Image (tube, rainbow, N blue to C red):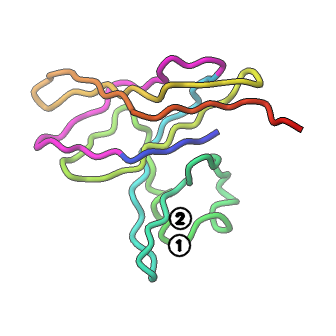
């Protein structure tokens, strides 16, 4: 499962991400967290974030059939979140890829730990929750 949210450094200094984790996860295993640039708007003005909320981590051969050209460029520029330096005012899509280890799984979001260029340490918790339950028939 992939879930995404916006991420922007609203400060006035570059920060470096030093850690990333799921919050209060139950039956989820974190596979990977990525930063994906926000794509350029499409011709009609829409911005199509990649990957979409609730989507999946596409295989390289699926990308041309899954994303628009702008989305393909953004996906190709993705970077691991840990170690990334985030400039002030730059918006990214934080993409979290997690696997369920049981039929029911949940998390209260993600925590990013980071430090500024003076070495001061901080963390930020997301404000979203994800819950997966077995499908009723």
Give the x, y percent position of residue 110.
Answer: 44, 28
Q: Residues within 10 Å of mark 1 (few under 14, many from 20)?
A: some
Q: Quadrant of the C terminus?
A: top right
Q: Quadrant of residue 97?
A: top right
Q: Residue at x 31, y 28 (%)?
A: 124
Direction right: furthest residue: 137
Residue annotated with mark 1: 69
Residue 128 at x, y = what percent?
A: 46, 35
Give the residues in magenta.
Answer: 7-27
Q: Are marks 2 and 1 in contact (CB under 8 Å)?
A: yes
Which residue sits at x=47%, y=29%? 109
- 16 is within the stretch colored magenta: yes
| The N terminus, quarter of image | top right
Q: Which mark is residue 46?
A: none
Q: CA distance from mark 2 to mark 1?
A: 5 Å
Question: What residue does disc 2 label?
Answer: 72
102 on left or right of 4: right
Tally the marks: 2
Q: Is residue 93 above or below residue 30?
A: below
Depth check: give the residue in front, 72 or 46: 46
Q: Nearer the viewer, residue 132 or 79?
A: 132
């Amino acid at each position: 499962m992939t879930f995404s949210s916006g991420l922007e450094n609203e400060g006035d200094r570059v920060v470096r991400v030093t850690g990333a984790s799921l919050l209060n996860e139950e039956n989820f295993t974190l596979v990977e967290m990525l930063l994906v640039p926000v794509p350029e708007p499409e011709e009609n003005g829409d911005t199509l974030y990649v990957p979409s909320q609730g989507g999946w981590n596409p295989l390289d051969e699926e990308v041309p059939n899954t994303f628009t050209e702008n989305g393909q460029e953004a996906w190709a520029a993705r970077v691991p979140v840990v170690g990334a330096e985030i400039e002030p005012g730059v918006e990214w899509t934080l993409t979290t890829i997690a696997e369920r280890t049981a039929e029911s799984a949940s998390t209260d979001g993600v925590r990013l730990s980071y430090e500024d260029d003076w070495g001061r340490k901080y963390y930020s918790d997301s404000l979203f929750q994800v819950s997966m339950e077995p499908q009723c028939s």
